Image: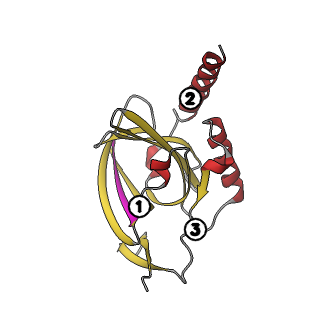
Amino acid sequence: MGAGLLGAILGLVLVQVEVAVQDLDLQKMAGFWREVGVASNQNLALKTPRRPEALFLTLRGAELTVKAAYNSSGSCETENIVGSEVDVSGRFVFPGHREIHVIDTDYERYAILRLSLHWQGRAFHVLKYFSRALEQDKEVLDKFHLVAKDYGLSPKDVHLNAWDNLEENRLLVLDTDYKNFLFVCVESIQN
């Protein structure tokens, strides 16, 4: 009976989250986002050698194009991925059995996303906190911890990125239009 009650509570939380994003203005999501933190209790999601540093989102109709800059074992890579919106506002599917669901955003300071990967018959999930700013926002970080808790994650499942150590890393400019955006990646300095 305990598992059934837990399942019902988690179902309510997920329904409440999906209702909260029905009024999502996807055009306001466009632009630069930097990954600040991740939350997951699955090692595969946390230990990946290919961690996104930043995203640049563009929308055309129901298609979302994600230009991602990754730190791949200390060097930078970029990837363009096109996904399409599905039945729920703010939920997109991508090639490779991947999904992104916008859980919460204020469009200006933060976006909290739930990323899912279906691989070898299993589903892997991770919550991600993205920011448009370079500095962390304590209020949003507290909100991220609460969302993680709502998804059954503990404080030890929340991990913040520490990419701004310029003694061990350097910033590489990957793309810019010299007016509206500067797309950078962090690369480890190899001794």
Q: Tell me the tag on residue 49.
A: 1
Which of disc 3 and disc 2 is earlier in sequence?
2
Which is nearer the eye, 162 or 94? Answer: 162
- Crowding at dot 3, Cα within 10 Å, few <14 / some 14-19 / many 20+, comes out as few
Vertical comparison of 38 with 19: above or below: below
x and y, in percent, of residue 48 in the image = 43, 56
- Crowding at dot 2, Cα within 10 Å, few <14 / some 14-19 / many 20+, comes out as some
Q: Tell me the tag on residue 162.
A: 3
The residue located at (48%, 41%) in the rendering is 125
Q: Which stretch did the figure color magenta?
A: 62-71
x and y, in percent, of residue 65 in the image = 33, 51
Q: Alpha-carbon distance for marks 3 and 1? A: 15 Å
The residue located at (63%, 22%) in the rendering is 6
Colouring of the image = secondary structure
SS assignment for the magenta stretch, majority: strand
Q: Is residue 156 left or right of residue 68?
A: right
Q: Secondary structure at mark 1?
A: loop
Q: Residue 137, located in which quarter of the rendered image?
A: bottom right
Type of the residue with mark 3? Ala
Which is nearer the eye, 146 or 59? Answer: 146
Q: Nearer the viewer, mark 2 or mark 3?
A: 3
Q: Mark 2 and 1 residues: CB-CB less than 8 Å, in contact?
A: no
Vertical comparison of 143 with 152: above or below: below
